Amino acid sequence: MGEKSQARGLPSSPHPQTDEKGTLQPSRDISGHIKAFYNATWSQRYGHGLPPGPLTLLYSLTVSIFALGGLGGSLLVGMLVARYGRHGTLGRSALLVLLAGGLMAFSRQLAAPEMVIIGRAITGLHSGICLSVVPLYLGEIAPKNLRGFLGLLPSIFICLGVFCAQVLGLPELLGQDRYWPLFLAVVAIPASLQLLLLHCFPESPRFLLIERNDVCGSTEALRRFLGTSDVQEVLEEMKEEQRSLSLVQTVSVWQLLQERSVRWQTLSVAVVNVGMQLSGIDAIWFYTNTIFRNAGIPESQIPYTTVGTGAIEVVAGLIGCFTIEKLGRRPLIITGFCAMGTCLAGITGCLLLQAALPWMRYVAVACVVGIIAGFCMGPAGVPFLMTAELFTQSHRSAAYVLGGSLNWLCNFTIGFIFPFLQMSTGAFSYLVFCGVCLLVALYVYLIVPETKNKTFMEISRVFAARQPLAPLCHAGMLRLRGYGAVESSLEGSEHSLP
């Protein structure tokens, strides 16, 4: 997941640094070094440097192309996992990063900014594939009592990757101008480890049995994963799901959207994935340095303050990972979105008051930490886990394609429009994200059931018992019982959905 973390650590200032004559000045961060490289290469080719506007546009393309690559990767997931399986798809996608790392490593030596942009697009493609396939694979191999823990592990390693990228990007390490191609090429290291370690793990037993009808292969895979020869109970559970799906083919995204029996699950996946990106977390990650600069943090302290937020991110992710099986999915995701919304409102206040109250700069840092911590404890990993848990095998791949596509599309949108939103509304831009966070938390509270320690078939039956969407126009959303039932508001009705 190193390429995802590097993408989040790459952009730190939306505009190039220039003097009063418009001459590009050296910067202490990676983004400034890359902009200087683009400007110098353009000057060598055409005899003049890039004006600030086109240079910003070229760098914005470098940043946003990652999200477009991720969108493309998420759209390919359904086809890839059906053809190569979960394990096979992960192995093949890792080869893409080795290619991307090579392109970016030699981009300056060959004076080719295009190699940086293409390399970023390829790493985005790999991330789009992995961010769907890894939770899918883990969700299918995990026993139900460990599904939450394993489902959040990808977010933990993303946090670790972010922290490592922030440390490596310090001026004392790879943050120097001569080392930035090496910094971008570091993505090849985790990809190489992924290729090596995948040989230790078999294909998903659920995929082998339900989609390939390979009973022997599934049994052997279960024994390796569970560390015991007695896997009959788990095998029978998967066979029950296979029998229920024997007359059902794997559905496409379009079929998923049309199928009424899974409409609540589909809507929930869409709301949570869109909400995860529109919560403003990407604006915080992409422009953390800018937020700290606007809050009055001294320029020399910003890189180290950012590293500190990365460390908090790791700690928060670990807390979420080790508490999810005790607390459940819903409390973590609701608490996470509520904490983010509160801290986003706090950042607005800090930016408005920091001129009059200098100590507000430290409150702004605390709010950024709170947003990142809230995200890592719940919304960072739970939506991907929920996608695996809310659908049976025939619908799961299409659900990941839908959720991943919405995720990356919103990622690109926020990364592209946030600077303009900030220019037009200033500090009040964060209130938009605050509203989104609170609305998503309310939706999860009202609609999404708790899935802890439930089999895939049990979760499917919970949603099957829900009312269709249309009657909700005439039904009230009243107090939930247990894990989010919708109760009819018709007078005298005591009927409650499970």
Image (cartoon, grey):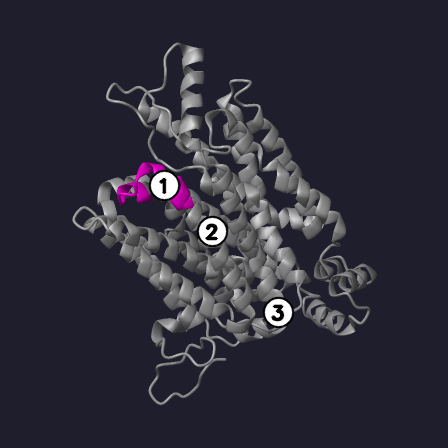
- Residue toward you, 67 or 51: 51
Residue 129 coordinates in the image, percent (x, y): 59, 46
Question: In this rendering, which labeled residue sits more in front, label 3 or label 2?
Answer: 2
Q: Which quadrant holds residue 235?
A: bottom right
- Which region shows up in magenta? 291-306
Say few, some or many: other residues with alpha carbon within 10 Å of mark 2 (under 14 / 14 to 19 / 20 or more).
Answer: many
Question: Which residue is labeled 2 in the image?
Answer: 311
The image's mark for residue 199 is none
Identify the secondary structure beneath mark 3. Answer: helix
Looking at the image, is mark 2 or mark 1 earlier in the sequence? 1
Number of numbered tags placed on the structure image: 3
Looking at the image, is mark 3 or mark 2 earlier in the sequence? 2
**Outermost residue to the top:** 47
Asked whether 298 falls inside the magenta stretch, the response is yes
Asked whether 473 falls inside the magenta stretch, the response is no
Question: Which residue is labeled 1 in the image?
Answer: 302
- Residue toward you, 179 or 486: 179
Q: Main secondary structure of the magenta part?
A: helix
Residue 6 coordinates in the image, percent (x, y): 50, 40
Question: Which residue is labeled 3 in the image?
Answer: 456
